[in-house]
Image (spheres, rainbow, N blue to C red):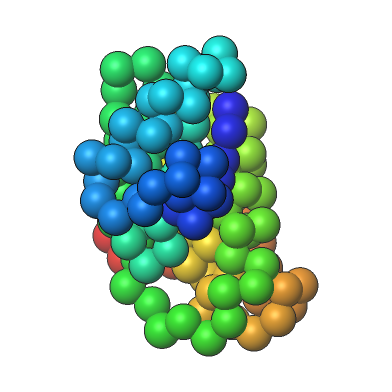
Amino acid sequence: MLVVNRHEAAILFHAPMTDRQAIAAAASVLNDRFDLKATIITCGSEGAVLVRGDAVIELPAWPIDVVDTVGAGDAFLGGLVAAWYGGSDDRAALRFAAAAGALAASGSGAFMSLPNRPAVEAFLQSCG
């Protein structure tokens, strides 16, 4: 599995990642090139895209008031691993990860803004 943000993907491909079709195509190429099971490209306020084989899962971002994005990627990855470890499928894990990243970006500082599982679950419950 590879997780990169849109800007990192643009550097890898020497091309802008401006639309979902280009992002999904880039993730698919990365899967093939590096023999990966899945690739996720995060897009900040525009959500994330997960490509596993022929399956493409697009997830919009949670609407939040961004305070500080430092630590949001770390929270996203931690949430992703926690959700998969807990048995979630790709869509649910991506949703949980995005919620963790959103909560981190709505706080200040890398460490103090990192949410715990109950905070992410409460956020998801309040958002429906």
What residue lies at 43% left-to-right and 63% top-to-bottom? 44
Q: Position of residue 64 (x, y in %)?
A: 38, 77
Q: Position of residue 39 (x, y in %)?
A: 49, 31
Q: Position of residue 65 (x, y in %)?
A: 41, 84
Horizontal arrangement in the rendering, residue 42 relative to residue 118 (left or right): left
Q: Quadrant of residue 24?
A: top left
Please state which of residues 123 and 98 is positioned toward the viewer in this rendering. Answer: 98
Please state which of residues 71 and 120 is positioned toward the viewer in this rendering. Answer: 71
What residue lies at 42% left-to-right and 32% top-to-bottom? 27
What residue lies at 32% left-to-right and 31% top-to-bottom? 25
Q: Position of residue 30 (x, y in %)?
A: 49, 27
- The extreme front residue here reads 14
Q: Which part of the image, by quadrant, shows the N terminus? A: top right
Horizontal arrangement in the rendering, residue 100 relative to residue 123 (left or right): right
Would you say residue 31 is visible in this rendering? Answer: yes
Please state which of residues 32 and 88 is positioned toward the viewer in this rendering. Answer: 32
Please state which of residues 112 and 25 is positioned toward the viewer in this rendering. Answer: 25
What residue lies at 30% left-to-right and 23% top-to-bottom? 55
